[in-house]
Image: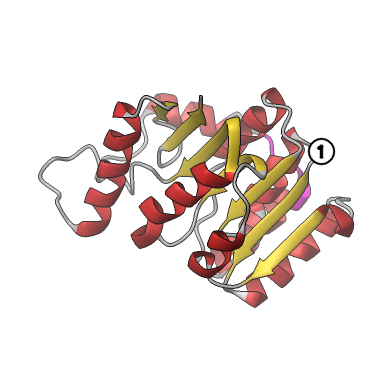
Amino acid sequence: MAGPSEDQRYVEDRVVERPEIVKARRDSLEMGLKPVTPATGALIAQIAASTDAKRIIEIGTGLGVSALWLLTGAPEATLTSIDNEVEHQHLARESLLAAGVPAARTRLIAGAAAEVLPRINDGSYDLCLVDADAASVIEYVEHALRITRPGGTVIVPRALFHGRVPNPVLRDELTQGFRDLAEVVNAAEDVVSALVPIGDGLLLITKR
C-alpha cells in the first residue's frame, strides 16, 4: 500500500482543527478507532456549507469527529447519527456538547444501521455521511440515496479502502465492494459522483 504523497501530506498538515475535534480525534485513536483525516473533515464541512444542509444524517458515529466537522460547515443543521456502540455515542455527545452544539439539535440512535435505516422516510435528509461497517457499505449507500432528497449528497469516506481499491490484483470481498460501489455510481444516470483522493478516499454522490 502506497503512503501519502507530498501533496497529500501538505493538504493534511495545513488543516487547523478546533480543540474539541483535536480531543475527539485523540480519544478515537486511543480507542483504536480511525476517524476521518483532518483534510477529509475540512472537505465534508465545506460540502455541508456549500449545500446549505439543514438535515444531516450520519451512519457511524464514532466519537464524533465527523459530526463535529459536518456541524462546523452547517452550524444550524440538525444531526442524526446511528451507531451500535453506546459508549462511543456517549463520548460523541460529550464532544458535541463541549463544542456548544445544543442537545436538541442532535439525535444519536443506538442500534444497527441495517435495522434503523429501513424505518427512515424517503428524501428526509439533505446530506448523508456513510462511515460504518465496510462489509455493508453498498447496502448503506443504497439506503442513504433513498433517504436523501433530490439534490442532496451522500458522502462515503474510506472509499479507496486503505489504498487497496486502485490495485487490481487485490480482489478480497471488502476491497471489491468499495470498487464495485465506485463503478456503479460512476455509471448511474440518476446521480453525479466523484471519487476524491483525499485521506483514504472520499466518494461524493449527488442525486439529480
Residue at mark 1: 75
Q: In the image, is residue 61 above or below residue 127?
A: below
Type of amino acid under label 1: Pro
Image point (76%, 60%), residue name: 107
Image point (73%, 33%), residue name: 73
Residue 4 position in % (x across, y down) = 37, 36
- In the displayed structure image, the side of residue 50 where residue 148 appears, left or right: left
Q: Using the rendered view, name the quadrant where residue 53 is placed.
A: top right
Along the line of sight, the residue nearer the viewer: 19 or 110: 110
- In the displayed structure image, the side of residue 91 where residue 114 appears, left or right: left
First to last magenta residue range: 16-20
Q: Using the rendered view, name the quadrant where residue 183 is placed.
A: top left
Q: In which quarter of the image is the N terminus?
A: top left
- In the displayed structure image, the side of residue 89 where residue 135 appears, left or right: left
Residue 105 position in % (x across, y down) = 84, 52
**Prevailing secondary structure class for the magenta stretch in the rendered image:** loop
Residue 76 position in % (x across, y down) = 84, 38
Along the line of sight, the residue nearer the viewer: 65 or 183: 183
Please tell me whether mark 1 sits on a helix, a strand or a loop.
loop
Q: In the image, is residue 131 above or below residue 71?
A: below
Along the line of sight, the residue nearer the viewer: 168 or 163: 168
Image point (68%, 44%), residue name: 56
Dot 1: few (<14), some (14–19), or many (≥20) neighbours within 10 Å? some
Structure colour scheme: secondary structure
Q: Does the magenta stretch include residue 182?
A: no
- In the displayed structure image, the side of residue 181 where residue 10 appears, left or right: right
